[in-house]
Image (cartoon, rainbow, N blue to C red):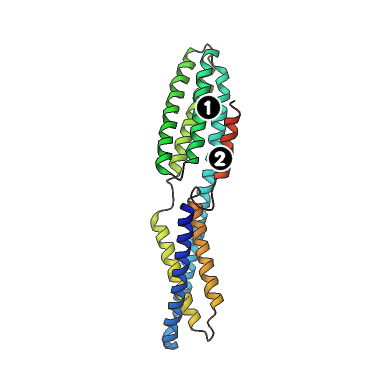
Amino acid sequence: MLAALSIGFALALFGVLLGLVELGRRVAAARDPASSRGAAAVEGAIFALMGLLIAFTFSAAQSRLDKRRTLVIEEANAIGTAYLRLDLLPAAAQPGLRDAFRAYTDSRIAYYKKFRNQRAAGAEREHTIALARQIWRDGTAAVKASPDPRVPSLLIPSLNEMIDLESSRVAFRHIHAPVAIFVLLIVLAFACALFAGVGMGRKEIFSQLYRTAFAVLLTVTVLVIVDTEFPRVGFININALDYLLKDVRAGMN
């Protein structure tokens, strides 16, 4: 569904860009060439601003994508480490906590499987939070019952980190560039298409190849930036890293 929306957005953007290039060409063809003096400076400034904005938004989106990948790795490591440290607890306290850890990890995996269905994903996260509370409650009780004084300093921080990383991953889903940046990006793309058409209209030969290539490249650039910013819903995604949680879960059997 979301992939179809991405394709629809790309096709719509491509069509508008093509139309604006054609509009610019017709405007230039209908104008007196003498009235275009000084226009090159304006066109250069607009294209330079577009290049700067593309560089800025793509760099920021890539940075956030890298951070999301890092959080996936860190959460898988935190769950695996906390699970291993359950060995430090009294034997009687371990079975219940290990079952809770298995259910918690299953819930984290299920959450991302259901991610594109926001209602189902929200319900799954509520289940995750309930399991995290159970793990914390049972874990702290088991730590208090442990005769080993090293256990609190080893297990409690691991449980904290595991729970905090789940919250961090959810919070980072909502960290994006301001909507105004994306609006400005689209507006500048339209302006560039219009001025590109004007520039082409001043030539004796208007190339359909250049017109199409310009629209295609600008459309692909904008689509890549948007997909990088939302890596769970487009063609660029981090779903491949979900195997890390599955590996951790396999190690709990």
Q: Is residue 131 above or below residue 33?
A: above
Which residue is under mark 2?
Answer: 242
Q: Kindly indicate the quadrant of the structure image that contains residue 173.
A: top left
Q: Amino acid at mark 2?
A: Asp
Q: Earlier in the sequence, mark 1 or mark 2?
A: 1
Task: Report the quarter where the C terminus lies.
Answer: top right
* Side of 77 where 179 appears, left or right: left
Q: Residue 112: percent from the left, percent from the top?
A: 49, 40
User: Can the viewer see residue 40 in this picture?
Assistant: no
Which residue is drawn at the image coordinates 52% and 44% (left, top)?
67
Q: What's the CA distance linking mark 1 and mark 2?
A: 16 Å
Label 1: few (<14), some (14–19) or many (≥20) C-alpha neighbours in 10 Å: many
Q: Secondary structure at mark 1?
A: helix
Which residue is drawn at the image coordinates 50% and 28% (left, top)?
103
Which residue is under mark 1?
Answer: 102
Q: Amino acid at mark 1?
A: Arg
Q: Nearer the viewer, residue 14 or 163?
A: 14
Label 2: few (<14), some (14–19) or many (≥20) C-alpha neighbours in 10 Å: some
